[in-house]
Image: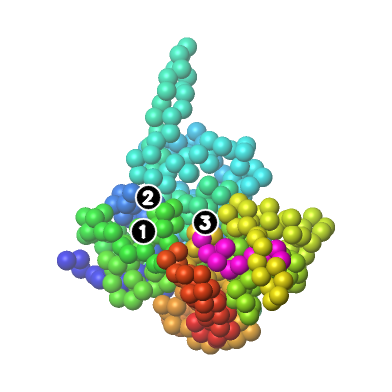
Amino acid sequence: MTWEAGHVVLDAIEGLLARFVAFPSDHARVAVALWIVHTHAVEAFESTPRLALLSPEKGSGKTRTLEVLALVVPAPLHVVNISAAALYRLVADRQPTLLLDEADSYLGVVTAKQHEDLRGLINAGHRRGATVYRGEVSGKTVKVAEFPAFAACALAGIGDLPDTILDRSVIVPMKRRAPHEHVEPFRERLVRDEAKELRDRIAAWAAEHPDELANTWPDMPVGIADRAADVWEPLIAIADRAGGDWPTRARAAAAAINSARLERDLSLGVQLLADCRRLYAGHDSDRFTTEALVQALVALDESPWGDLRGKPIDARGIARRLKKYDVRSGDHRFDDKVLKGYRAEDFHDAWQRYLPAVAHVADVAPAAAHRGGNVARDTPAPIGSSTSQNGHGSGSQEGQQGQHPLQAGSSSLDSGAAQAATIAALRALGNAEEEEAV
C-alpha cells in the first residue's frame, strides 16, 4: 500500500495547476493533471499521449503551463527550438519529458515539411519500443544508428499542428484569460520547493503501482476507440487506480475533449452527414426531395452550404459528396408524386459509421449557448466551456454535452416498421436538442 492515496495526489496537482493557469474548462485541467502523473509512470503503458496546448493567439497561458509542468514532471526538457539530431540523442541519453514551446514555428502545418525528421520522431515516440534509424558518418564510412524514440511530450503553439501529431494528442485549446478569471503571479523561485515536494509525491505513488497500471484495461467512454483509445487509456487507467471521483471525472474529460476534437476535425463530407441528421430530426417525414434538402442545407446559417467557392451547394454537389458514403438519391413518393429524394434510412449506415455516439458540440450548441445552469462533474461538456464547481473554475457556466446515438432502423424490420422506428428516433433526437439538459 502506498503511503498516500492517488486521488489525494491528483487533487494536489490540480490545485497547483489552478493557481497559475486559467484553463478553458475543468475537463482540460483534469486531463493535464492526469498527463503529469502518466509521465512518472510512462514505462507502464504501451503508448504515451502527446499533450497539445493550442491557441489562436499568444498570451493564452501555453508557456505558463509548460513552466508549471517543468516543475513536476520527471527529467523535463523545456525548449523553444531544437534540431532533430539533437533531440534523437537527448531522448536516447536522458529519456526526458519533452516540453516543446512555440511548436508552430517548426511543426506547424506550414513549416512541418521543413522538419520531417523532428515530426517523425514525435510521431514514432508515441509508442513504446519505437525507434528511428539514421545514417551517421564515422570516418569515411556511414553507419546506421538506431535511436529510441519513446518519450512523453507536451507541445505548445499558435494555430494547428499536423494531423499526425494531433491524432496522438490530448488537445487543450487554450484561451486568453477573461477579466473575471484570476490566477496567482508565477515566480519559479517561490514555488520551486513546493513543486519539488509534489513531484516526489507523484513519483512515489507511480512507483508503487507499475504492475497494476501496466496490466489494467480500463473501460473507455462511448465513442472513444482505436487511436483515441490509445491516447486516453493511460490517463483513465491512472484515474481508476487513484480512485475518489477521478475515474468519473477522467471519463467525462475524455468524452468532452474527444468530442471537441471530432468537431474541429470535421471534413466537408462528415459535416454534410451531421447537418443532414439535424435536418431529418426536425422534419415531419422520413424523406426530403432533393430540391427541399438543398434549400434546407443552404438555409443553415452556420454551415458552409450557402457559399462553396462562391456558389451554394446544388443537387449534383450533394450527390457527389454523399456518394462517397454510399448514400444515393432515389425515386420516392411525396404525396401524390414520385420525385428524386433521400430517405432517412438511406443515411443510417453512414450516420452510424461516421458520426460519433456522443453528439457533436454543434448539435447541442444552439440549445445550450444561451442558457446557464450548473453541470455535474461527470457530465461531458465541450472543451471550451468552464465551471467553478470544484473551486478552480473560471466562474462561467459549463455547456452541456448530450448523447444521442442513432439506433433506429434494422435490416430485419419490414419497410413500414423501419420507417416508423426511423421517424421516432429522429424526433427523439430533435427533442433532445431542444432540452436544456440531455
Look at mark 1 in the image and give the residue it sits on: 233
What SS does tag 2 mark? Answer: loop
Q: Nearer the viewer, mark 1 or mark 3?
A: 1
Q: How far apart are marks 1 and 2 (CA)?
A: 9 Å
| Kind of residue at badge 1 | Glu
Q: Earlier in the sequence, mark 1 or mark 2?
A: 2
What SS does tag 1 mark? Answer: helix
Tell me which segment is drawn in magenta: 339-349
Look at mark 2 in the image and give the residue it sits on: 47
> Is 214 situated above or below 122?
below
Q: Identify which residue is drawn at 45% across, 78% down.
A: 379
Query: Residue 362's image quarter?
Result: bottom right
| Kind of residue at badge 3 | Ala
> Is 326 situated above or below 395?
above
Look at mark 3 in the image and give the residue it sits on: 52
**Most extreme residue toward the front, as rendered?**
336
Q: Identify which residue is drawn at 58% across, 54% down.
A: 326
Q: Identify which residue is drawn at 57% across, 63% down.
A: 346
Q: Relative to residue 147, is residue 301 drawn left or right?
A: right
Q: Residues within 10 Å of mark 3 (few under 14, many from 20)?
A: many
Q: Relative to residue 129, is residue 342 drawn left or right?
A: right
- Between 322 and 284, the one nearer to me in the picture: 284
> Is 232 situated above or below 389?
above
Q: Which of marks 1 and 3 is nearer the N terminus?
A: 3
Q: Distance between the residues labelled 1 and 3?
A: 17 Å
